[in-house]
Amino acid sequence: MNSPAPRGEGGDRADRAADRALAEAVAGLSNEVLDWRFKAVPAIADGYTVAEFLQTGPRLSDFGTPLLTLDARALSANIVAMANWCRRHGLSLAPHGKTTMAPALYLDQLRAGAWGITVANEPQLRVARAFGVRRIHLANSLVRPAALRWLAQQQAQDRDFRFSSWVDSVGAVEQMTAGLPAGSSVDVCVELGVPGGRTGARGIQVALEVAEAVRRSPRLALVGVCGYEGAVAHGTDAEQLATVDRYLDDLAALHTAAWPMYDLSTAGTAMLTVGGSAYFDRVATRLGGFADPFGVRGPATEVVLRSGAYVAHDDGYYRSITPANRTDGPVLTSAMHGWARVVSQPEPGLALLDAGRRDLPFDQGLPEPQQRIRPDGTVTPLVGAVISRLNDQHAFLELGAPDDVEVGDVVRLGLSHPCTAFDKWTLIPTLEDADVRDPRVVGLIRTFF
């Protein structure tokens, strides 16, 4: 399996063919019939296909609440901004597909120059393959025997399919080696973790022992090292940034130490892969110099970011921690909003909205009230109001003034953490411009969680 050169502007023949296949599969989603199975869909859409309903020119006001929407302008701008930033820094980008699980967005990201798509587990891998994604990086270990047999079949059936995954223990190496059919081979990266952290070998020496086990395996090829710097910090004070830097330096040291064990006879280039959506500026600074696609200074190497939240960004955690706040990171805008209706005002200063934990993310901060939309369509800012807590189906809106809202009003909410927003919706309306009065709905994004 000879891996292609890194995707550039235009890509190679196989990349273009894969993009066409993905585009056809995504286009096929427009034939899906709408009905009660999709909680975002209003009754007026029942019986229409996606394409037919969009041709009717629906507006936001045609949809009920609770609702999650995406802003087409912001999505496009974010995808382009991140792609351009990576190019300027000599980095490849394999966006983490687990954020959206939306093949239509994968297509946009790949067309903007993404190296491939990252996934987190076997079901996500199967979704990406079902839509024909050509290059997939599994940021996890794949050890289930049946899954390994399925993977080998996929590789045998599609010579252009490129796959790589992680290992962090000798046991994982042994499980993969035993589970893969004779004659098959899988590219893997050794994951470096930290004590008390998530997955990953605890220390460089242990990671090198894992790398040596891969080198001895007849069915695995060591093609790089990997990790996740977002697991070692959660803020941007000097101490946490220093912790991130130390981790990245250790990963660089592991990469250098593992060079003699790399087997690039099929992969072509080594991978040094890291990167969530909070510290990719540190990745560029500490690891960008290892990007060496032609092998001038050692093994041909790509530094691959796996950032995923950038595509939708947010009005919470990522807004506060994005690299643009401190360095030269791309300027990103939240592309997602929640919409909820005031259904009760049981006491002064309190209103209840019809959206809760089943509809909106809350693990990285509660929703942020932004606008009030009256039944006649009038839009006014909501100042001083806060969401104090969520129940399963209700949000508690504490008002800045008693007349801030009335029963029947719709409240636009800024949200925090796209990874736990998308997973609550199987179909997400895309607005032409979320900041105008009663915006036009120009798309319906299908997700597969």
Image (cartoon, helix red, strand yellow):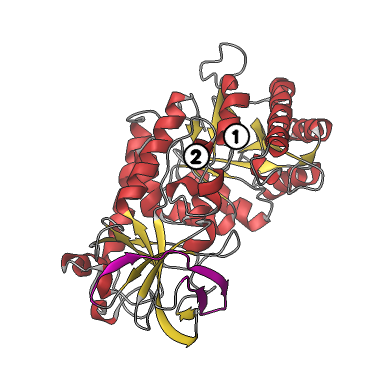
Which label is found at residue 273?
1
Q: Residue 144 in the image: x percent, y percent?
A: 67, 56
Residue at screen point 60% across, 62% down: 363
Left or right? Give the position of 348 relative to 251. Answer: left
Question: SS for tag 1?
Answer: strand
Q: Is residue 388 magenta?
A: yes
Q: Nearer the viewer, residue 384 or 198?
A: 384
Left or right? Give the position of 436 relative to 247. Answer: left
Question: SS for tag 2?
Answer: loop
Query: In the rendered view, would you say 126 is above or below 290?
Result: below
Dividing the picture into quadrants, the one containing residue 299 is top right
Q: From mark 1 to mark 2, how far is it between C-alphas?
A: 9 Å
Cβ atoms under marks 1 and 2 closer than 8 Å: yes
Q: Residue 27 in the image: x percent, y percent?
A: 28, 56
At label 1, which amino acid type do we have?
Thr
Q: Residue 190 in the image: x percent, y percent?
A: 70, 36
What residue span does the magenta drawing correspond to?
376-400
Q: Residue furthest left?
A: 56
Residue at mark 2: 94
Q: Residue 333 in the image: x percent, y percent?
A: 41, 47
